[in-house]
Amino acid sequence: MSSLYIDRRGVEVRLDGEALAFYEKGARAGTIPLAPLERVFLRGDVILHANLLGKLGEKGIGVVVLSGRKA
């Protein structure tokens, strides 16, 4: 099982074909392919778009949103 933890404040995650693209302050910071992922954990101030959530659902990739209030 492959899990991805996204906890960087202010990062924007966009869909780029079959990959997640990460943007910081408008500049592309990197990508991760969707294929090996089974779960994505989000913590803190992360920006997502609805089409990304739809694609994750199509692929059967679970999304867990953590409040960030407790360590």
Image (cartoon, rainbow, N blue to C red):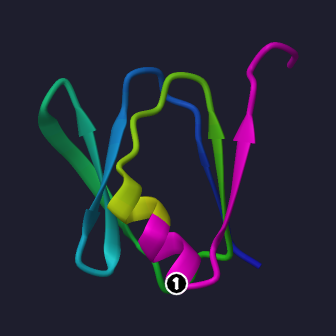
Seen at 74% across and 20% down, the residue is 68
Which amino acid type corresponds to the residue marked 1 in the rendered image? Glu
Seen at 86% across and 19% down, the residue is 71
On screen, residue 49 versus residue 40, left or right, reads: left
Q: Is 57 colored magenta in this rendering?
A: yes
Q: In this figure, what is the number of numbered marks?
A: 1
Seen at 27% across and 53% down, the residue is 30
Q: Which residue is mark 1?
A: 58
Q: Position of residue 53 (x, y in %)?
A: 48, 61
Q: Position of residue 32 (x, y in %)?
A: 39, 66
On screen, residue 30 versus residue 20, left or right, reads: left
On screen, residue 66 versus residue 15, left or right, reads: right
Q: Residues within 10 Å of mark 1 (few under 14, many from 20)?
A: few
Range drawn in magenta: 54-71
Residue that extends furthest to the right in the rendered view of this protein = 70
Residue that extends furthest to the top in the rendered view of this protein = 69
| Residue 19 against residue 46 in the figure, above or below | below
Seen at 35% across and 49% down, the residue is 49
Residue 23 sits in which quadrant? top left
Q: Quadrant of the N terminus?
A: bottom right
